[in-house]
Amino acid sequence: MPLLALLLLAVPIIPAVGAGPVGRAEATSAPGTAQAAGAAQPPAGTVSRTGSFLTDTAGRVVLPRGVTVPAGTVPTAADMARWIDYGFTGSRIEVPMTAGGRFPPNGERPPAGDPEQGGLEQVGAVVRDLTDHGLFVVIGIVPGSAGYTPSTSDLAAGLRRLAGRFGAVGGLIGFEVPTSTAAEDLAATLRSSDPNHTLWVAQAAPFDPAARVAANGAAGYITGWADGSRARVGALADAGDVFNLGWFYDEPVTGRPRTGIGAGQVRAAATPPAEVVRPYPAAVAGIPESYGSDASGVFRLTYRTSSAVRGAFPAGTATAIVVPGWSYSSGYQVRVTGGQVTSAPGAGVLCVVASAGAAEVSVEVAPAAGAAPVAPARAGAVNCSSGAAHSAQATQGSRAADDAAADDAAAGEAAAGGGGGAGVGSGGGDDADSPLLLLVLPLLGAALTAAVLGPLFLRLRRR
C-alpha cells in the first residue's frame, strides 16, 4: 500500500469545510466497471484516478513528470523535444478565466477571434501539439486578471465550457481549479458535463505548506515548488517519488501578476534544475511498491503485478521506465527479477514485461560504460510495444476529437452533458465516491507532518 494511503489510514478523517463528507480512499468505479455496464469508453489516452493512483486506459499506474506551460505561452517543437530529452511525460497548461467563466484570447499578441471564448481555441492548439508528442496534459484554470478570485459559479461555468470543448479529447489528465470550498459541487458539475475527465483542486502540500499540490481523493500532483531553491525542489521531487505523485515544475513568480492575459504578463516555461531530471516509472503495469535512485546513481523499482484497476493485465503489458541521458551519460545496464526487458539496448525508455506467474517484479538500472540513452521522438510509455497501438489510437482520437470539438464548441457548451460522450470513466466515479481526501492532511498540523515526514526526507537525501 502506498505510504500516503498508510498515513491517511493512521489518522482520523476530518471533513474539509465545504468539501463534503470524507470517507473511502479506494476507488469503487473503474474503466472495466463502466465498460461492463455498457458505457462508452473514455477518449483514448485519458488518465483517470483509481484510489491513490493515476491510471491510463490500459490500467497502468501513471506517474507524469513535466513542466507548467504559463498562460499565454506557446511551446515550440524545440521546447517539447527538450522536455522529452529530460524524460518528461506530461505538461500542465494554464488557461486564464474571467468573470462568468469565460476564456478570452490571451498572450502578448492574442489572435483575432471570439473575444470571450477564443482562449479555448488557443489552448486546443497547444493540447494537440503536446499530445501529438505523447505528453499527457492537465488544463488548469487561473485567474484572468489581477485581484480576481473566481467564484464557485464562475468556476462551474468555466468547467462546463472546458468540458464542452475538451470532453472528447484524448490524452488529458483532467481539469484543475484553484482552491475552493465547493469542491464537491464543482466535481458534480464536471461529471454532469464530462464524465470521463477528473477534477483536480489546488491546495497547500501536506508535506510542505509552502508548496502546492492539486488533489482528488488520495491522489494528486505537485504544482508549486516553495521558494524554488535547488535543495527544496529536490526534496519536493523526492516527495513525489515517495507518495507516487506526479509533478509539473514551475518557478515561483513574484512582483507581477500571473494572469498571462496581456503584454508584459507572459512568462516562458521554466527550465527545471538538474535535481528533478531523474529516472522514474512513467507507467507501471502493476502497483508500485517503491522506486528511486541511490547516491551511486542506481535506480531501483519494485512493483506488484496486480492491477490497481482490475485483476490482471493482458500478457505482454509493459512497464515503461524513463532513463534520461542526463542521468546515464555513459549508458546503463539492467537487471530484472520476475520479468524481462523488451526494449532495445540503451533505449531512452526501458520497457519491462512481467514473467508469467510473477507476483512481483524488481528492476535495477545502474550506470555502465557506453553511450548515453537516446531520447525517443515521443514521450514515455508510448515507446513500449504493448502501448504502441494504444498510443496511435490516443493521437488519432485526440486529433479527431479536437477537430470535432472545435467545430462544435458552441453546441457542446449549450448541451453541457454531451461534451465528453456517453461514457462513465473512472475519474467520474471516483469523484462521486471519494471527495478530496488530501484536504485532510494539512489539518493534521505542521508538527505532526514534520514528525512523520522528517526522517523520511533524511533518508531520501542520501541520494
Image (tube, helix red, strand yellow):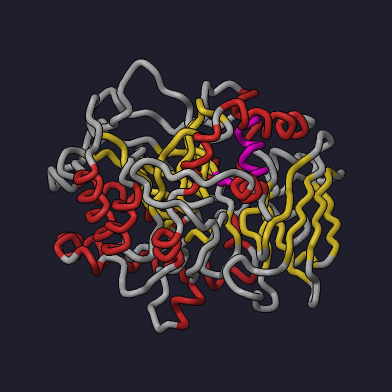
As for residue 242 lying within the magenta part, the answer is: yes
When asked about the image quadrant of residue 452, the answer is top right
- Our reading of the magenta stretch's main secondary structure is helix
Q: Nearer the viewer, residue 355 or 443?
A: 443
When asked about the image quadrant of residue 167, the answer is bottom left
What range is drawn magenta here? 234-246
Tell me where residue 181 appears, x and y as whole percent: 33, 41
Task: Name above or below for residue 134 compared with residue 36.
Answer: above
Q: Residue furthest front?
A: 12
Residue drawn at (22%, 30%) of the image: 148
Task: Name above or below for residue 144 compared with residue 134.
Answer: above
Task: Name above or below for residue 449 compared with residue 77.
Answer: above
Tell me where residue 267 appears, x and y as whole percent: 37, 28
Q: Residue furthest top?
A: 255
Count of labels shown? 0
The quadrant of the picture occupied by the C terminus is top right
Apparent side of residue 345 relative to residue 47 in the rendered image (left or right) = right
As for residue 165 lying within the magenta part, the answer is: no
Q: Nearer the viewer, residue 132 or 446?
A: 446
- Say if residue 377 shows up in the picture: no
The quadrant of the picture occupied by the N terminus is bottom right
Tell me where residue 215 appears, x and y as whole percent: 46, 46
Residue drawn at (83%, 55%) of the image: 334
Residue drawn at (36%, 38%) of the image: 179
Task: Name above or below for residue 439 compared with residue 427.
Answer: above
Tell me where residue 57 appears, x and y as whole percent: 51, 68
- Say if residue 417 shows up in the picture: yes
